[in-house]
Amino acid sequence: MDIGNHPTREQLIEAAQSGSDTLAPHLAQCEDCRLLFSLLTRFQVAGEVELPSAPAAWINRAAAIVEGATAGSKLRRLVGKLTFDSWSAMPALQVRGTATDERRLRVEAESILLDLRAEHQPNGWQFIARVVGDVSDSRSWKLHAAGQTVYPDERGYFIWNDQKPPQTIVLETGSLQIEVEQLSWTRHTT
């Protein structure tokens, strides 16, 4: 077979499956066919691809996750308690240089903490939050606020913008939901 006469796809598949040398002279000279032959030999994608079954333990675990997600009665709901609010802190306890249009909140539910920073800007509000405490992976959470669903970035931070601050924040992961209700965004001065 000379260099100008390329083998067909079927010939390449057959040679890759059988290990035949019939195409060796052409493959020695043709880089494109050599690459295709190499891929077909290495990855065995010729013909039917046989996929192994997943282990039974994986299948059972996936079924349990789906079952837990669809069974509303198994969802544990907690009410988050506001344990720190920079707007209600005494001036001596506030951080120097804290902007008046910035608010920091800490919400606790059992051993889970939500740290939230809100900053009022000319075009609306910017929020940054993070779940800390007794959590295995903060990136598995999602946060619902003012009709938005926010997912954490690769470092575990929830970042979003809105025209108005949320009255309710809901954190959710798997079978746990934490709700923070009746957030007031009216600043009380003393």
Image (cartoon, rainbow, N blue to C red):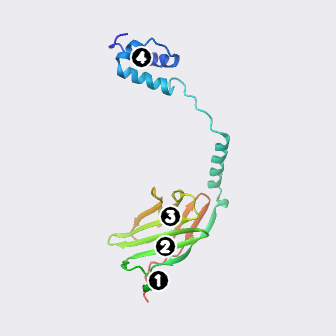
Structural crowding at the residue carrying mark 4, measured as other residues with C-alpha within 10 Å and reported as few (<14), some (14–19) or many (≥20): few
Percent position of residue 29, x then y: 34, 16
Identify the amino acid type marked 3: His
The residue to which callout 4 is attached is 8
Q: Using the numbered discs, state the Cα–Cα distance from disc 1 to disc 4 in whole angstroms.
A: 77 Å
Disc 1 marks which residue? 89
**Where, quadrant-wise, is the C terminus in this rendering?**
bottom left
Q: Secondary structure at mark 4?
A: loop
Q: Amino acid at mark 4?
A: Thr
Distance, label 3 to label 1, CA atoms, is: 26 Å
Mark number for residue 144?
Answer: 3
- Judging depth in this view, the residue of 180 and 96 nearest the camera is 96
Query: Residue 167 shows which numbered tag?
Result: 2
Label 1 or label 4, whichever lies nearer to me, is 1
Evaluate if marks 3 and 4 touch, with contact meaning CB atoms under 8 Å apart.
Answer: no
Give the amino acid type for the residue marked by disc 1 in the picture.
Answer: Ala
Q: Position of residue 60 (x, y in %)?
A: 67, 45
Q: Nearer the viewer, mark 1 or mark 2?
A: 1
Left or right: residue 91 compared with residue 81:
left
In the image, residue 37 lies at what x, y percent?
Answer: 43, 21
